[in-house]
Amino acid sequence: MLPFPDFWRQLLRCGVCGISAMAAAITLPAAAQTATATAASGPLPAEVEAALARARLPRDALSVLVVDAQGGRASPRLAHRAQVPVNPASVMKLVTTYAALEQLGPAYVWNTPVYLQGTVQEGSLRGNVYIQGQGDPKLVMERLWLLMRRLQGQGIQVIVGDIVLDRSAFDVPEHDPARFDGEPLRPYNAAPDALLLNYKSSVMTFVPDAAAGLARIQYDPPLAGVQRQATVALAAPGTECGDWRGGLRAELGDPVKVAFQGVYPAACGERAWPVAAADPRAFAVRAVEGMWRELGGKLTGSVRDGKVPAGLKPAFVVTSPALAEVVRDVNKYSNNVMAQHVFLSLALQKNGVATFDGAREALRQWWVARMGDAELPLADNGAGLSRDARITAQALARMLQVAWASPVMPELVASLPIAGVDGTLRRSQSRAGTAHLKTGSLRDVMAVAGYVHGASGRRYVLVAVVNHANAGGARPVLDALTDWAARDQ
């Protein structure tokens, strides 16, 4: 057992907002034009029409296709605007994760080598430690703790030198976390980093102590050089939980200080609040030094960025969970930065360095090889956190049919939220367990795509995307489509 809770799952759940009007169209891949997507728009089921009306959504806001998962030449069960390019939001993660499962393999792992430069004598390393990021998307607090413990296992308690972080495996542009929707402290806006630690986010856990009249605050991971308020006063007795985050009046914009001017309601019980770093670039530096010192290690120099010297061999390597497990986290909880790491790893594996252009080209080549002479959907960053990403319901349904016949189908399907059971579909009002569907939502987008299990025993591909200013109210529409697809007798 690790001496702290497995808190990182708080960071996996990502809801996002912000989407502009639909942009330029894409051309449907010619090879994807099978009978699964040749039907013109037809009538919608009565319950779907009713749900659209209640949500004040026009029929033209919805693109949907329901087809047999095994493909073939049978006509679609339902097709409506299936050839119209739409913004799929996080449903785009299906394209990224399926491509990665096929190209990298379910057992693919990311290695983070650690190098020692110098000699170890009587517990002291006289030289530098180098940590080389290779894009591990799940180097969370627990695994950073284990890395530091392994470093101490080399007989090191004091580093008479620096800890150097090598992030050169990713060549990505500078990222403004406020650019997408003006919410820079939301974990879903974190940018990819070759040495991504804890998703560049901290978790603040509030534990009320009624007898003392305060709530104690635990911060994970420890961050060097950051002043963090240890307690906050409790609200007046009888105060409902309500908007407890707003009531705290948190001051989180200062990279070296966290403070609260408000109070915490005891009625909330224990609550966790994930927050992205105010200074994302410095987060890894602060987390590495903070964890090293938390474990009793001493450092005479500093933690800084740099590169591993040529010819140096690693002292040990920290290995990530397998891609199949990472894909499950990406799709179940719609984690954006993990999805971007999976996407960039397509380029890293092929080219030795990860760029977004390289990832898009790797995806294009894979799409053509698997779907035929096909023009690639506009994947942008591969995560769906984009105003530019586009795909048609038809193209996505065709890909899901190909995936159903793929050797990696079990891993892909197991990664999808189960309607009414877990992940981003745990609150779905459709019949529990009837579907494995990836969800997507932005300010003007709501979507689902995946597989529905029919009452007859047949399996169907369902792709449904709503692009409209009222898309936030489309959940009952998507639930109605899921239930309709499941009732096939």
Image (cartoon, grey):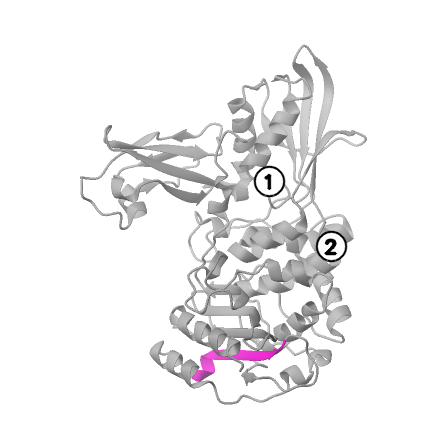
Give the answer, above or below, for where 298 lies relative to 192: above
What secondary structure is the stretch in magenta mostly built from?
A: strand
Dot 1 lies on which element?
loop
Residue 325: tell me if it is visible. yes
Q: Position of residue 96 (x, y in %)?
A: 64, 60
Residue type at the position of mark 2: Gly
Magenta segment boundaries in residue numbering:
59-68
Q: Quadrant of residue 268?
A: top left
Task: State the SS at label 2.
Answer: loop
Q: Tell me, yes or no, if residue 282 can be seen here.
A: no
Q: Is residue 164 above or below residue 263?
A: above
Is 231 placed left or right of 30 in the picture? left
The verdict on residue 144 being magenta is: no
Foreground pick, 53 / 419: 419
Task: Residue at 73%, 54% (x, y): give it.
Answer: 105
- Please provide percent x and percent y for residue 162: 63, 24
> From the viewer's perspective, is 31 left or right of 1?
right
Q: Could you tell me residue 448's position as x and y percent? A: 52, 69
Which mark identifies residue 139? 1
Q: Residue 105 carries which label?
A: 2
Q: Which residue is drawn at the image coordinates 46% and 39% (left, top)?
A: 202
Nearest to viewer (mark 2 / mark 1): 2
Residue in the image at 75% along x and 51% along y = 349
Instruction: Examine the rendered structure and indicate whether residue 380 appears above or below residue 328.
Output: below
Q: In screen coordinates, is 149 left or right of 269?
A: right
Q: Quadrant of residue 297?
A: top right
* Nearer to me, 20 or 69: 69
Q: Which of marks 2 and 1 is nearer the N terminus?
A: 2
